[in-house]
């Protein structure tokens, strides 16, 4: 009986070790969630809602994206039953078909938020990931690009973003943000195709001389 117990313990230990080795071999990162966001608790942050999003915030021309969001509430707020804005953090994950243009368009969006809408933006390392922070107008967000994804964490009514939530998502979505993205040249990527100039050729193809009115030729002989 003891030998059987020992054999079982050894088998379980072997399986656990194999799983650990496999995780390390894959870089130690947990898998990317099937529906984009983590549908479970993140430490003291309790998962409360999943929702697909119709509007993609970072639009990449020719690279279709789909977005998902999750909301988390602090454990303490849930226990007391009194939830304020500061007790809630939202996560938006946008998934693209390809990597093409994702980093470039995300950086362009953040630059526009600063120059056109007055948000304070900065580059910071949070949770081991290089990110861009966006603050202002009663909002606080952290955003970064990952392979074929853009991740945004934060919310309205906040003056900070919880680093542990950022770290959890950065572990699943490693940042591809280059250093100096806000001030240096835009990251590489395709520019939207320029619209062809209208040279009037379409109008010429539809030209009908019968519908053209010419200036009157009945002028006075005295003129």
Image (cartoon, helix red, strand yellow):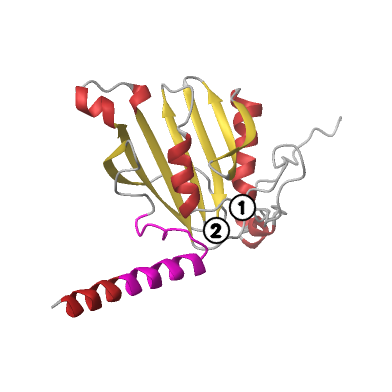
The correct choice, above or below, for 89 with respect to 59 in the image is: above
Q: Is residue 215 in the magenta section?
A: no
According to the image, label 1 marks what residue? 176
Residue 86 horizontal/vertical position (percent): 37, 23
Magenta segment: 13-35
Tag count in the figure?
A: 2
Mark 2 touches mark 1? (CB < 8 Å): yes
Mark 2 crowd level (few <14, some 14–19, many ≥20, 10 Å Cα): some
Side (left or right) of 20 relative to 144? left
Farthest residue toward the left? 1
Farthest residue toward the right? 223
According to the image, label 2 marks what residue? 147
Determine which of the numbered discs, if any, sits on residue 56 in the image: none
Q: Quadrant of the N terminus?
A: bottom left
Closest to the observer, 179 or 80: 80
Q: Residue at x 50, y 48 (%)?
A: 170
Q: Residue at x 38, y 33 (%)?
A: 89
Mark 1 crowd level (few <14, some 14–19, many ≥20, 10 Å Cα): some
Determine the secondary structure under disc 1: loop
Q: Is residue 31 in the magenta section?
A: yes
Query: Distance from label 2 to label 1 (Cα)?
Result: 7 Å
Q: Quadrant of the C terminus?
A: top right
Image quadrant where residue 14 sits:
bottom left
Determine the secondary structure under disc 2: loop
Closest to the observer, 16 or 2: 2
Q: Residue at x 43, y 48 (%)?
A: 93
Image quadrant where residue 16 sits:
bottom left
Residue 179 horizontal/vertical position (percent): 71, 44
């Amino acid at each position: 009986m003891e030998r059987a117990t020992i054999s079982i313990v050894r088998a379980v230990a072997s399986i656990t070790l194999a799983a650990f080795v496999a995780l390390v071999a894959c870089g130690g990162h947990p898998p990317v969630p099937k529906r984009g966001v983590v549908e479970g608790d993140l430490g003291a942050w309790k998962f409360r809602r999943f929702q697909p999003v119709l509007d993609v915030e970072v639009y990449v021309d020719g690279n279709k994206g789909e977005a998902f969001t999750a909301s988390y509430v602090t454990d303490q707020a849930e226990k007391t039953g009194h939830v304020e804005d500061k007790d809630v953090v939202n996560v938006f994950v946008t998934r693209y078909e390809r990597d093409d243009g994702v980093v470039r368009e995300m950086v362009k969006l953040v630059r526009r938020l600063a120059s056109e809408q007055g948000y304070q933006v900065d580059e910071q390392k949070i949770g081991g990931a290089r990110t861009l922070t966006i603050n202002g107008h009663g909002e606080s967000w952290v955003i970064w690009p990952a392979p074929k994804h853009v991740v945004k964490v934060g919310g309205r009514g906040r003056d900070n973003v919880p680093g542990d939530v950022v770290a959890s998502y950065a572990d699943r979505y490693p940042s591809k943000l280059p250093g100096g993205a806000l001030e240096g040249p835009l990251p590489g990527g395709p520019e939207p195709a320029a619209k062809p100039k209208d040279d009037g050729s379409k109008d010429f193809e539809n030209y009908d001389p019968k519908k053209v009115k010419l200036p009157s030729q009945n002028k006075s002989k005295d003129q």
